[in-house]
Structures are given as C-alpha cells and as structure tokens.
C-alpha cells in the first residue's frame, strides 16, 4: 500500500517531515508539469534523488564543483559501458577507480537532493506517491555499493533546512520563479506509481494526532472527518510548526527569532521559557505559563540568572548544540531553576538550543507544568530550531551586505 496526495494540499516540506518522523523506507515520486523527481528514503532518512533535468545529474554536479574532470567522468562512463550487465552506479564506479574522494561524493549527493527539493518547492501543483519498501537503483541512488559497506543516509532535517534556505535566497535574488496556479495540470498521482491502491490510513503513518487538520485531504487522510459545525479545534503541533516556519522567513533579529521559538514551544508545552546564553550563565528572558496563564502568551522578562556548571544538563546542550527531551533530575534544574519557577509535576523536560553558526545563543526550556508528560514532535521542533538559526544567519548576513553597500 502506498502513500500519495497532492502538493496543492500538502507541501513537499510536510511530506518529507512526515516520512522522516514515521521512519518510512521507499521511493517518493513527485510529478509536476515539468517532469518527475524522485527522493529515496531509508528508515526516514534521504539517501538519494533523481531529477528530470539532465543538467542536474551527479556527474555534472561533481564537475561543476571541481572535484572531478570531464575526462574522469568520460572514463567512468566508458567503464560502465564495458561492464555490461555488471554495470555499477556512476558514483560507485568513480569511487572504485579512485576518481573521486568519498567526502566529495557525499557533498555531491547532498547537493543533488537539495537541488531536487528546491525545484519541487517552486511547484504549486503536482502529485506525489510513495512506493514503500521499494528503493530504485540507478546512477542517482545508493551511491556507495554494498561491498564497500557504505550505506549513506543524510540527516533529513539538515538537508531540508538547507534546501529551504537555498530556495529563499534564489527566490529573493530572482533566480527562480514559482509556478502559477493556472499552469498546465500535472499528471495525476495514479500516473506516478503502478503500485495499485495508493491510499493509506492515518494510523498506518502513525498520524492519528493530526485529525484536526483543516484542509482538503490527500488520499492518506480519507479516514479523517472535519469537526462539527461551530466547533473550534485546537491547532495541531504540525500546524503550529508550519506557522512558525512562515514567521521565521521574515525575522531580522535574534530576539525576534527567540520569541518565535518560545511561542512555538509554548503552544505545545504548558510551560516554556527563553534562557539567553552568556559565557558563564543563562539569563531568563520571557516565559509562557510561568508567572501568567499560558493563554496570555509571553509574560514579562524574568531576569533571574543560572550559573553554568560543568556536567550540568544545560552545559551539555550548550556544548553539543543538540536538544534534550526526557526525564532529568539535574542539580541545576532542581536547585536553581525550579527555585525560581516552581518544579513541574513530571520530570520530563525539553531544552531546545538556538544556534547562530556553531554557537548556541539561547535555549528554550519547556516542561508539562502540573500535567503528566505526553508525546511531542521532537524531530519537528529540532527542524524548526535549525531553520530558525539559518533564517537569522541569512538575515544578519544580508544586513551586513547592505551596510557595506551604503
């Protein structure tokens, strides 16, 4: 059974995030007016892509990057032709004959995937279909042969955030233009895959919690029903995070970026708090549900300070730059933070870092207050924080460039 739908109602960003969070394996085929693009997933991670444009191919990308020559590519293609039925994928041929370095091949693959996603982001209409547990093998997929024992799975969140950044920059500079809605209709989802019945239930994807989404449903939401007339459904985590992405595209300062993250986390957790990172301490900024009701939104600046100590949970997050979500009885939490905001009923907490470059500039702390802990979309929150960092980096870079011109 396959997962399919229409890009008009579910964006490629949402599709990739859903496949990543539900750890799907298979070939995702996306068909638009210009042609077909495929993305390959392995346990939720992207490990290959195929682009309809012959100019967007592995060999071309590696030549343009200056890591192989035209002669290297021609030699690899000749070796492929000589191999006949034993023909290896292009990258495998280049690697086995020492014509490309492994790191360069990795970057070539990442570039191919990013360019493919950027192209799909310009499509207003199109259909997609996942062929589960089917991994197409060709020059653009499975770059490293099994005998090298190198199965390459790229970090999906990073690739997606980079693609969004590239798309925003190219669109700003007028290098790409989104399709118009009145453009020629793309082929239907049925034409994408011959896998038979292309419907799947929300439970099959583990998306039962998305049953309040208000939109025309793609095929995998057929079992869901709209809310009764007059009722107002609370926004789902997916809707909250999607709105955050929209707002982050417009940020121009670090405080603004941190505030958007606070509101996003505060819409999912009963309590949330921004802590600004200084050299030896964290300074409490605004909070939600701390000294005000959650519905009231961010409260006033709290201002208390938490001295950082070696081995503390906050120090770990600041040093590694990775979020933490789970139960913690860290001393800094118990003795200092909870002394200022009172301890939660459950020890499960989130600490979400906001990075500017490689440095963590603030963290968003969250807990469940007086309520028991529940499941939260940690992967999507991590993606949101990654995108927030990229957005503010881009905004600051543009501001510096403008200042130099002036």
Image (cartoon, rainbow, N blue to C red):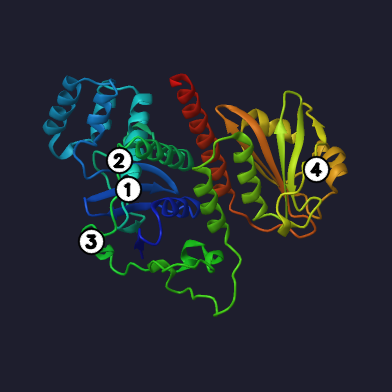
| Residue 70 as seen in the image, left or right of residue 136 | left
The Cα atoms of the two marked residues, 3 and 2, are separated by 20 Å
* Residue at the image position 59 percent from the left and 32 percent from the top: 355
Q: Classify 146 as above or below 238.
A: above
Nearest the viewer among 92 and 382 is 382
Q: Please name whichever residue, 235 or 69, is drawn nearer the observer in this view of the structure.
A: 235
x, y percent for residue 184: 21, 59
Residue 19: image location, x then y, percent: 44, 53
**From the viewer's perspective, is 293 left or right of 163?**
right
Residue that numbered label 4 is attached to: 329
Earlier residue among tags 4 and 2 = 2
Q: Earlier in the sequence, mark 1 or mark 3?
A: 1
Residue 295 versus residue 57: which sits nearer the camera?
295
What residue is at 17 percent from the left and 22 percent from the top?
70
Q: Earlier in the sequence, mark 4 or mark 1?
A: 1
Q: For mark 2, does the 10 Å Cα neighbourhood hold few (<14), some (14 to 19), or many (20 or more) residues?
A: some
- Closer to viewer: mark 3 or mark 2: 2
Residues at circles 3 and 2 in contact by the CB criterion of under 8 Å: no
Sequence order check, earlier mark of 3 and 2: 2
Distance from disc 3 to disc 4, alpha carbons, whole Å, reads: 56 Å
Depth check, mark 4 against mark 1: the one in front is 1
Q: Secondary structure at mark 4?
A: loop
Left or right? Give the position of 313 relative to 194.
Answer: right
Q: Which residue is mark 3?
A: 185
Circle 1 sits on which residue?
122
363 to 287, vertically: above or below: above
The residue tagged 2 is 176
Q: Percent x, y for residue 233? A: 59, 69
């Amino acid at each position: 059974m396959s997962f399919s739908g229409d890009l008009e109602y579910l964006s490629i960003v949402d599709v990739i995030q859903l496949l990543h969070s539900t750890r799907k394996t298979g070939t995702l085929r996306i068909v638009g007016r210009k042609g077909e693009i495929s993305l390959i997933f392995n346990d939720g991670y992207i490990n290959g892509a195929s682009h309809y444009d012959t100019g967007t191919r592995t060999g071309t990308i590696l030549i343009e990057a200056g890591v192989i020559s035209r002669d290297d590519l021609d030699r690899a293609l000749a070796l492929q032709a000589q191999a006949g039925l034993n023909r290896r994928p292009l990258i495998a041929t280049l690697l086995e004959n020492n014509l490309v370095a492994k790191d360069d091949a990795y970057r070539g693959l990442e570039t191919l995937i990013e360019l493919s996603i950027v192209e799909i982001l310009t499509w207003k209409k199109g259909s997609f279909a996942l062929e589960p547990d089917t991994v197409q093998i060709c020059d653009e997929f499975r770059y490293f042969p099994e005998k090298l024992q190198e199965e390459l799975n790229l970090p999906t969140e990073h690739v997606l955030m980079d693609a969004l950044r590239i798309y925003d920059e190219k669109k700003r500079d007028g290098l790409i233009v989104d399709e118009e809605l009145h453009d020629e209709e793309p082929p239907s989802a049925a034409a994408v895959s011959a896998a038979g019945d292309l419907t799947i239930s929300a439970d099959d994807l583990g998306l039962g919690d998305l049953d309040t989404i208000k939109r025309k449903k793609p095929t995998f939401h057929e079992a869901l029903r709209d809310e009764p007339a007059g009722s107002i459904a609370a926004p789902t985590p997916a809707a909250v995070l999607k709105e955050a992405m929209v707002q982050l595209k417009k940020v121009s300062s670090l405080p603004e970026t941190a505030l958007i993250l606070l509101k996003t986390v505060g819409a999912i957790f009963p309590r949330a708090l921004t802590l600004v990172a200084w050299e030896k301490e964290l300074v409490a900024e605004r909070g939600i549900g701390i000294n005000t009701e959650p519905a009231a939104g961010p409260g006033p600046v709290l201002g208390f300070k938490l001295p950082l100590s070696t081995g503390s949970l906050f120090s770990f997050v600041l040093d590694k730059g990775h979020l933490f979500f789970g139960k913690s009885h860290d001393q800094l939490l118990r003795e200092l933070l909870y002394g200022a905001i009172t301890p939660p009923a459950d020890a499960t907490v989130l600490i979400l870092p906001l990075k500017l470059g490689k440095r963590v500039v603030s963290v968003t702390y969250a807990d469940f207050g007086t309520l028991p802990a529940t499941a939260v979309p940690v992967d999507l929150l991590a993606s949101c924080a990654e995108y927030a960092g990229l957005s503010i980096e881009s905004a600051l870079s543009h501001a510096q460039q403008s200042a130099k011109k002036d």
